[in-house]
Image (spheres, grey):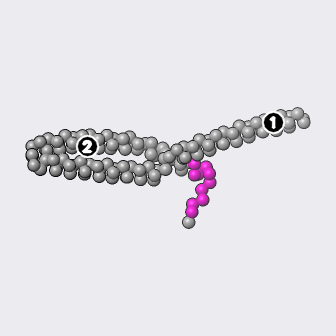
């Protein structure tokens, strides 16, 4: 069964989701930085290990590079899945901006109409 929220409830839920994602964005950046540091360290270890074992070292280095490539694919897939689930995309931001602009126009028009009605009533007295 679908949840039928009003426009304002839907917009507030979007704002909440974006704020939650922005709070945890630094964690995602830290994970990527840690992943990059580990990749560099693993590459250095693999090269040093390859030099110490003349016959098997290059096979180990090749295996490490293949495993690292698979790890990048896995991390990238998880990252894109999280981005999809959090709905933090350009359309959402544009929808929020459009909704805020429409609300501002409605409020300014209602203020102008109220002032005009007040002026009209005062002129009839």
98 lies left or right of 110: left
Residue at image location 90% in from the left, 36% down from the top: 124
Asked if 118 appears above or below 53 in the picture, the reply is above
Q: Nearer the viewer, residue 50 or 87?
A: 50
**Residue marked by disc 1:** 116
40 lies left or right of 118: left
The answer to whether marks 2 and 1 mark residues whose Cβ atoms lie closer than 8 Å is no
Residue at image location 54% in from the left, 50% down from the top: 13
Q: Nearer the viewer, residue 34 or 58?
A: 58
Residue at image location 74% in from the left, 40% down from the top: 110
Q: Nearer the viewer, residue 94 or 77?
A: 77
SS type, badge 2: helix
Is residue 4 highlighted in magenta? yes
SS type, badge 1: helix
Question: How far is the residue under mark 2 from the one under mark 1?
Answer: 68 Å
45 lies left or right of 90: left
Name the N-terminal-most of marks 2 and 1.
2
**In this rendering, the label closer to the viewer, 2 or 1:** 2
Can you give x and y, in whole percent of width and height, for residue 33 in the image?
Answer: 31, 40
Where does the magenta region start and end? 2-11
Question: For the view shown, which residue lies furthest in the right direction?
Answer: 124
Among the 4 quarters of the image, the one containing residue 48: top left
Q: Nearer the viewer, residue 91 or 125?
A: 91
Asked if 41 appears above or below 62 in the picture, the reply is above
Q: Which circle marks residue 39 in the picture? A: 2
Can you give x and y, in whole percent of width and height, for residue 92 in the image?
Answer: 54, 47
Can you give x and y, in whole percent of width and height, for residue 125 in the image?
Answer: 90, 35
Is residue 117 highlighted in magenta? no
């Amino acid at each position: 069964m679908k949840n039928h929220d009003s426009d304002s409830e839907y917009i507030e839920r979007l704002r909440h989701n974006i704020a939650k994602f922005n709070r945890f964005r630094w964690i995602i950046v830290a994970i990527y930085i840690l992943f990059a540091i580990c990749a560099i360290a693993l590459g250095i270890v693999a090269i040093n290990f390859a030099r110490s074992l003349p016959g098997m070292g290059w096979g180990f280095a090749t295996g490490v590079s293949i495993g690292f490539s698979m790890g990048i694919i896995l991390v990238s897939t998880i990252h894109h899945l999280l981005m999809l689930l959090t709905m933090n995309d350009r359309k959402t931001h544009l929808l929020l901006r459009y909704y805020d602009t429409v609300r501002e126009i409605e409020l300014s028009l209602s203020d102008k109409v109220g002032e005009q009605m007040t002026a009209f009533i005062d002129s009839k007295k």
